[in-house]
Image (tube, rainbow, N blue to C red):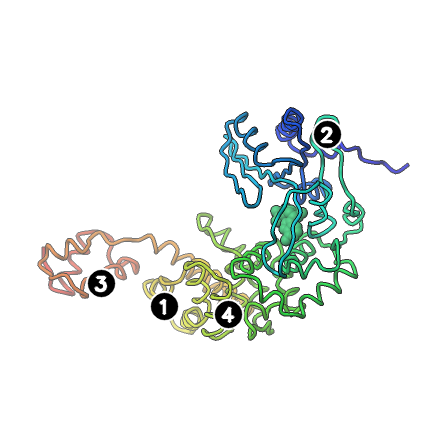
Amino acid sequence: MKHRMTQNDLLRRLPQERLSLLRELGNLADEGGVSLYLIGGVVRDLLLKRENWDLDLTVEGDGIAFARLVADRYGAGLAAFERFATARLVFPDGLKMDIATTRRESYAQPAVLPTVQPASIEEDLSRRDFTINAMAMQLNPGQFGRVLDAYGGQRDLRARTIRVLHAGSFQDDPTRIFRAIRFEQRFGFRLERTASRLLAQAASTNLIQQLSGPRLQNEILLLFAEHDSVRAIARLAQLKLLRFLHRRLCYTTNVRRVVTAVPKALAWWARRFTDSVVDRPIVYLMALSSESSPAVVAAMIRRLALSRVQAENVSAGGSRIDRALKRLTNKGTVRPSQVYRLFADLSDEALVLLLAKQVSRQHGVRLSLLKRHLVAYVKNRTIKTALTGRDLQTMGLKPGPRYKTILGKLLDARIDGMITTEAEERAFLQKRFGLVG
Ligand code: ATP
């Protein structure tokens, strides 16, 4: 006989202290006379036996009032967003939890944020993106663990299928196009036939163009943060969605090679430089636009409303990296200080891209040379000169642009190992620039 999992088995997949907390919150909901549910992705992931640290709860009643009750009881921090009838709690141990009010959403126009009104749990589930995300689990004591699944979410999880709840879903909210690709790639699921047709239809219109910059950016960067970003990007290209980043952005063979080399470059970098925190999605965006003209890249940056730091990174993806790569993989030796100068303006993201470009060229010898340069550079970039501008002043040099040149030469000599002590620095300044002090 086929084993049927009981609802309590499902919740036992949660860590014990989470499970206890949810039970307590269920009791608190009964005291407050409201129905409380775990909802959306966390229910899906419980069924899939995947870890999910986002505890999304929803209250049939006043969500914010219930969140206040919880905050008082547990000494949690609370931020309430009245307009969306939601609250975010941060517990003393750092646990974060979102508590919403069950609601109905209506879209005045496609692609804009909806207006919300309180509604039943059934209606709340009916506004969700896909059947696998449209399930809830009740937490009130009498009903603890009861799964609400009106749209066949469990059936679709078993069939590894992504299905929309109604035909207008992608039109109402084109971010669901990207969400569909995200879940499809993450779980290795397939879009159900109608959903696939509707997605292709919505993708062929200009709906995505109407999304605001920050919303489009969010979807793109989330997609690029997935485990297999390369496949996600290939899927975007296949669905002709890259045009929404810029109409001239093309997934050429060269770009594909660089994008495909990024995971290897990232893995090498992470192994070598454990302290460096690299913005992975941005590296993919850089790789994707690495063959585009500066004008196209600049327009894409504006379209995605990237932050200043992100924008600086992405615009460095082109010529500067190519110049450095050319110089370093040419024949002839390069001094460590020259490598330093070539890399000094590049962020770690740009250096990872540089490595990916070389990996994509599949030239073993030059690749190992480049890796050696990178290791030496990362070590050398912590080197500082003992003498500073203040010392130059003491030596009677008037402050001005020469300071930068002189201190630069001093640093180069240190990096190249020609001098190692302050006394040697002083001797160097005397010999090269006639400075004494
Ligand atoms: P992830 O694991 O990537 O966080 P998630 O499903 O938990 O996936 P969230 O963005 O945290 O995604 O959203 C939580 C839930 O809210 C979803 O499971 C879904 O039910 C609902 N939801 C989120 N975005 C949308 C949307 N654009 N349209 C409809 N429902 C949505």
Residue ID for mark 3: 404
| Cβ atoms under marks 4 and 3 closer than 8 Å | no
The three-letter amino acid code for the residue at tag 4 is Ser
User: For the residues marked 1 and 3, what is the alpha-carbon distance in whole angstroms?
Assistant: 22 Å
* Badge number at residue 144: 2
On the image, the x and y values in percent for residue 186 come to 67, 53
Along the horizontal axis of the image, is 46 left or right of 21? right
On the image, the x and y values in percent for residue 95 come to 54, 35
Along the horizontal axis of the image, is 344 left or right of 271? left
On the image, the x and y values in percent for residue 326 come to 43, 73
Dot 3: element: helix
Quadrant location, the C terminus:
bottom left
Give the mark nearer the N terminus: 4 vs 2.
2
Q: Quadrant of residue 428?
A: bottom left
Dot 4: element: loop
Along the horizontal axis of the image, is 410 left or right of 182? left
Give the mark nearer the N terminus: 1 vs 3.
1
Quadrant location, the N terminus:
top right
Residue drawn at x 57%, y 41% as measured from the top left: 86
Q: Is residue 19 above or below residue 336?
A: above
Between label 4 and label 1, give the one nearer the viewer. Answer: 4
User: For the residues marked 2 and 3, what is the alpha-carbon distance in whole angstroms?
Assistant: 69 Å
Residue ID for mark 1: 334
The three-letter amino acid code for the residue at tag 2 is Phe
Give the mark nearer the N terminus: 4 vs 3.
4
The three-letter amino acid code for the residue at tag 3 is Lys
On the image, the x and y values in percent for residue 238 come to 67, 68
